[in-house]
Image (tube, rainbow, N blue to C red):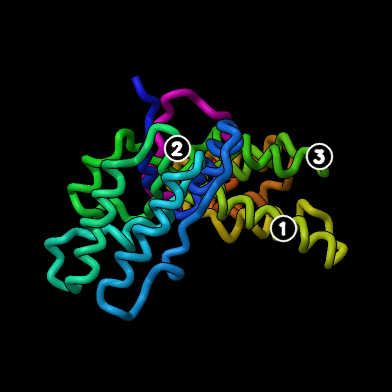
Amino acid sequence: MHPTRTLLFTGPPGVGKTMAARWLARELERPLLVLDLAAVMSSFLGRTGSNLRHVLDYAKSTECVLLLDELDALAKRRDDRGEVGELKRLVTVLLQEVDDWPASGLLVAATNHAELLDPAVWRRFEMSIEFSLPDVPQIERLSLALLAPYFADADTWSKVLAYALKGRSHNDIERDIMQARRAAVTSGSPLPDQLRTLVRANAGLTHAEKVELARILYHSEITSQRVAREITGVARDTIRKPEKKNEPVPSEEVA
């Protein structure tokens, strides 16, 4: 019984596909090789396929983890009439190489556009893992990890950010929080002021989520009812009203 030789990571940008490949290489104590598609592409007919074979043959001879990032650029559907014959031949080359991948190494491919991949590519990979956008509890844990070492109110603000940044990728969330921290340092303003600005800019939530966010903002004493209303657009009466389980929430509310 051989170990898994080939993995396919799918999902939107910024959700950790490349980081997962790095983690695998570290855990397996193997070097991580990343194929730069720009380095193998050639304007000469047939040269790109030859370059690709050389790179993959080298990786096969080394006990390593090879990452093929942006696989959709190399392995698009062969029935796509918009693609030239050279790119279609590359798909065939790749499929042959994946079939022969040795058990001594691990081939990891990642794509942001799984729908563009040739159907035969899916069958060649032994395992496919879909990376999704983080949910509210995951955003809360990530926000807490980014704020806790530097901020006394990190626990409360991580709950706020978990709702305000819903629908964004891990990478986007980390970037936004780091920018807020930098802005606080360079401007000399309190970090909560920068975090409130971040919440205002990202409050693209459903009404029920806005109500929940407004209540967290006010009842945790992060801000006043007025500021909570300005950030979320939720009326003060709704913010003051105690939360009830299974409480029906109107589709619209006038502040």
State the image coordinates of residue 15 (x, y, percent, origin top left).
49, 47
Q: Is residue 255 visible?
A: no
In front of the other: 243 or 63 = 63
Q: Secondary structure at mark 2?
A: loop
Name the residue tied to disc 1: 180
Tell me the crowding category of disc 3: few under 14, some 14 to 19, or many 20 or more residues within 10 angstroms, Cα based.
few
State the image coordinates of residue 123 (x, y, percent, origin top left).
21, 40
State the image coordinates of residue 194 (x, y, percent, origin top left).
73, 58
Q: CA distance from mark 2 to mark 3?
A: 38 Å
Residue 117, compared with residue 60, is above or below; it is below
Looking at the image, is mark 1 or mark 3 earlier in the sequence?
3
The three-letter amino acid code for the residue at tag 3 is: Pro
Looking at the image, is mark 1 or mark 2 earlier in the sequence?
2
- Mark 2 or 3: in front is 2
The residue at 53%/36% (across/down) is 24
State the image coordinates of residue 38 (x, y, percent, origin top left).
44, 70
Name the residue tied to disc 3: 149
Q: Secondary structure at mark 1?
A: helix
| The residue positioned farthest toward the right in the image shown | 188
In front of the other: 193 or 57 = 57
Q: Kindly check if marks 1 and 2 are in contact, taking CB atoms under 8 A apart as contact.
A: no
In front of the other: 9 or 147 = 9
Q: Does residue 162 appear left or right of residue 204 in this picture?
A: right
Residue 220 sits in which quadrant? top right
Q: Is residue 97 visible?
A: yes
